[in-house]
Image (spheres, rainbow, N blue to C red):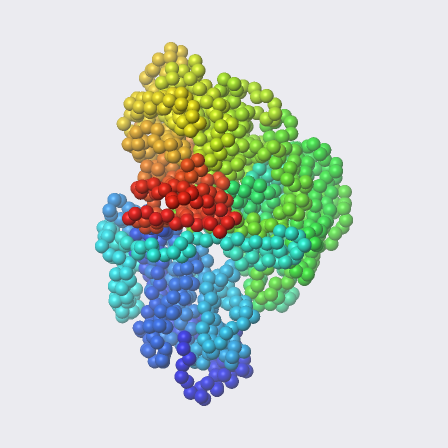
Amino acid sequence: MKELICSTIERNVVLKCIRDHKRLDCRTIDETRSVNIEFRSHPGYVSVTLGQTRVIAQASCRITKPKESRASEGHIRIHLDMSKIPLINLENWKHQEFVQELNGILEQNIRNSNCLDLESLCINSGELVWSIKIDLIVLNNCGNILDCANIAALCSLYHFRLPEVSVHGSEIRVYSSTERRAHPLRILHFPINVLFAFFVDGRYTLIDPNSDEERLMDGFVSISMNQHKEICGIHMGGKLGLKKEQVELCKKLAFKKVLELTDRIRQVVTDYYKTIEPTTHTQPSIIRIDNDEDEDNESSSSSENEDSVLTKSEIPPSPIENNVSLLLMPDLDHLSLTDDVPTMTTMNVDKSTSDLENVMCSYLTQNLNQPWPILKHYDQDHLYNIALPLGGIGTGTVSLGGRGELRDWEIGNKPAKKYSTVTIGNDAPFFSVFVNQPSTSSKITKALIGPVHPTEHLHYEGRACNHHGLPRFRQASFDAAYPFGIVNLSDSNMPIEVRIKGFNPFIPTDSESSGIPIAVLYYEVTNITNEVLDVSICGSIRNFVGQDGSKYFIAGDGDYVPIGAKNNINVYREDLAGELKGIYMNSTNVDPSDPAWGTIALTTLVDSPDTIITYRLSSIANAWYHAILDFWDDFSADGTLHDKGQLVDDNPMASLAVKKKIQPGDVELFPFFITWNFPNRMAWSPTIVGNYYSTLYKDAWDVCIQTLPHLADLESNTLDFVNLILASDYPGVLKEAALFNLATLRSQTVFRIADGHLMAWEGVFDIFGSCLGSCTHVWNYEQAIAFLFGNLAKTMRDVEFNYATFDDGAMNFRVQLPLTKPQERTGTAADGQMGCIMKMYRDWQLSGDDDFLKKNWEQVKKVLAFAWQPNSWDADQDGVEEGAQPNTMDVTYYGPNPQCNFWYLGALRAAYLMASYIGDEDFANKCGYLFINGSTWIDENLFNGEYYEQKIIDPKTGHFISSDDPNVPDYQLGKGCLVDQLVGQMMSHVCNLGYLASSTNMATTCRSILKYNYLDTFNEHFNNMRSFVIGDESGLLMASWPHGRLQFPFPYFSESMTGFEYTAACNMIYEYQTQEGLKCIQSIRDRFDGLKRNPFSEPECGHHYGRSMTSWATLLAWSGFHYSAVTRTMEFGDKTGVFFWSNGYSWGSCWIVKNKTKAHLTLVYGTIEIEFFGIKGKPMKKLLERVILSSTSDMKTLTIKFDD
């Protein structure tokens, strides 16, 4: 912006007013002009005035083709038109430069801040997306066009409604609002722009300058900020340099305006749609896709037609341009690696404790400035069942509820769903907030929890839920990108807003940093007033050492009363140079060999001498619930606590309060940490097997001492992992399924015994584990552990081949504990045993650990050869399993079937390659022969033209019989279409073993599974077993019989279970049936919406079922990623874009540019060797020399070029 010519008199008058802290329009220097927002009946059409400055905004949409590098994201464009205002208003400013400058700022503030969820604009990934355009027309300029246009653009986006659309071949159908209701855009945040002007060498600052002030200003700063106080853009100009203090002051003033306008925009749009039904606009019913136009032509043509937007009494164009076309996006090859590939930044802190204050201050500042990613938003109607587990791998967890409550206290050694450490009531652990607002002399205390759910209103004693009698916040929502969860709390009666942010470090390849028994909770409090507030946050937890939820009695009124605590003791401590303060909870009276014996700590970090820490180590006797009354009175008085000393109590209440002053518009961070150590795990063992994490930390306090000085690095590395997933070009539903199911690794389903072996239940019931023994046929499905924590995967292989396997090659499909005790034969599983061989091959390839293979090779041979023994699965050694085959359906199949035989063929193929590498030629030749023979036989005999079926053998005669024979044994598959009949093929793709049978038949089978097993609604479906899908939900059935069902099929045939659904969907994606696969996965995740089910727990036989982590394979199928550390070869499929990759020992991203002429490989964590690199459809590229990428060296990136 250039200085404008004005008269001396004019200048003197304006500057005199400013020096007197006045303005010619009677405003104060920190006061903005009034904002008026008016909507027309047309969605997305809005008129905004800021004083007399007026801007019209119109949002429109069109269907286009996505960028190659962002296959699942739509577009948003902004076009500013100032041709309607007289040029004299700009005087000698260069008109076009000015327009371009403003347009660029708006683009950065709105488009580049990711305020609009672009993935929600995806119609068909890689094919069709919505493109949103906002036309901004300036009708009058009386100063500060930028802020007015910014508000208009955001109002237009929030007001706009996107029509429903369906795609059939080359035609798309866009539905009018009379046919199907249009839906709002998904706005993630509101980047509000606030302009400040500076005068008299920067000594005076005005907000929202009018046109006279703009002409006289010496400089300006434009700040774009959202309601979370995250900066979305800062632009400066003029002839003076601004000091940091001036910019900081502007940021504080801007934040007040941001909060006000955010609420205003939300409210006016909400009020509009409450009272006015938008006018129906006729849309074209059928639109043919045209490939002839390009983006540049579209942009230029749109500007030519914009004159007509306002000439017809300001009637805007249709929200969908009638000429809907597919647009080819510009080539991105000219961009450098740093332009387009996400880069990771790591904050390094001094790992010593000598300068802890600087470390902690730096850490707390970083946490406020580094926004957490959001993959999924849950509104207030979808919070009831959300429970995000906070804890490490194998440590147990406490869950952050969708409304901010802490629930499911499973930090002991047993599952404890719904366990709140006490009888349901107000005594359950909770955090509360005290606020003192001086201007109103009001003191407010509330529990940091959202509103009670309607189902929690009725109880025979008036306490259907915990904290039922505590004042709560009226509004709540939840944002997540696992392992990060954010609860947003607000209340019209509160002068603050609160964000509860919870996480536990999760860093692929680093199992110890991902296995810390800690729940990190940040309470971010925003002062939304214009005065200083006294705010205190308090955490209260009863010392429940000795209670794990499994021991209890039922009182006379029917209440569940947990027992086990015995005169427990709370102690206040300080450590780490006085910066760590908190309460240590232990017990000298609980038996130290009890599985529920251990220690707990509730702590905080102090970053300022002005912070006040107070505590209580116990409460008064709880007669008539006086304990919580006494606490509430104490805390509500002034936000501090007054300790009464250690009173005798089995489970005394520990309370820790942190009090701070918060300046107007500021955000203060209140960090809390819950740590624990319960060493006496038994699991399914008759004796203690211990916890690996307990060998690293002596007690709960030691967890704080070792962890908190390094928490900044741990959080940063975890953010790197999650941000890299979110920045990748995987469809959003795949990211959600893959990330959110990683919560199973943190649940009580999975644990590490003291020697470090990873063990697992199949899932967990409310207070007991479900189905013991690291069940092979269940854990064959999941793919997350091997690709994220290779060292843990190898401990599971060690258990399978060296503890669960007998000399004859029989492998117990459920292993017993302790491992030091000789195993008793408990049974084999045909699918489980063969799958373990494939996993051995996978883990060897990913690690490149030849010693690991050689050490276990003889055991691998035994396990495979067991199938060839008399009366075993392939006794005649023809490559086909005909014998009695116990399997994951908890029955025995009689006769060859696709489920077990594809596992077998995969094992034969893997064994052939391992034997060839080892030099065991005889065994390799035998495996190769059986594989070829079996593969041919299965195609010729089990494929029925649509899918693979079972040929049933009568176990009494050993002969094949027809499915309608009265002698057919119960619990078979027969001619049924099984949902996971290609599970062995999925695993073969993951292992890069190729097709196990005809690829054509595989593709046909995938289509048949969708055709026969997918139900759009379950309303008409009869299910005699368990219901994991209900009513109008959709999903894949376990099996269907298009040509007639067996009388008594295998037990689970009428159910629908997510692990099996993911398996089928993965195969569809591998067969390029991508939309079909996405449809199945979307159906799964739609069911876990926070209201009906917990998004972080997909059950089967118990919560957090292990098979659900098959979802990680969806990323592998989409990207086509393979890595062999044995041959140092990395490969990707034929999709272009940015893809996260990991091999269990390192991880990073790969950007495959359009036309696949280049690949940019980036390593973020670990070390990896590359000698060969391949993209499907291109010849394998041999590098000139072996390249080692390492996160500890300067060599972290690699660019590979391919011939066009």
Residue furthest to the top:
957
Residue toward you, 820 or 110: 820
Q: Where, quadrant-wise, is the N terminus in this rendering?
A: bottom left
- In the rendered image, residue 520, in percent from the top left (x then y), is placed at 59, 48
**Total count of labels:** 0
Q: Residue at x 25, y 63 (%)?
A: 301
Decide: is 1116 above or below 270: above
Instruction: Note whether residue 233 is visible.
Output: yes
- In the rendered image, residue 817, in percent from the top left (x then y), is placed at 59, 26
Residue furthest to the front:
1185
Q: Residue at x 40, y 18 (%)?
A: 874
Decide: is 242 above or below 351: below
Q: Residue at x 59, y 58 (%)?
A: 362
- In the rendered image, residue 1092, in percent from the top left (x then y), is placed at 47, 42
Decide: is 640 above or below 822: below
Specify whether 1094 is left or right of 1016. right
Residue toward you, 793 or 422: 793
Residue furthest to the bottom:
9
Specify whether 363 is left or right of 1203. right
- In the rendered image, residue 1064, in percent from the top left (x then y), is placed at 38, 34
Instruction: Note whether residue 972 is visible.
Output: no
Residue toward you, 141 or 161: 141
* Picture quadrant of residue 463: top right
Q: Residue at x 27, y 64 (%)?
A: 300
Residue toward you, 846 or 650: 846
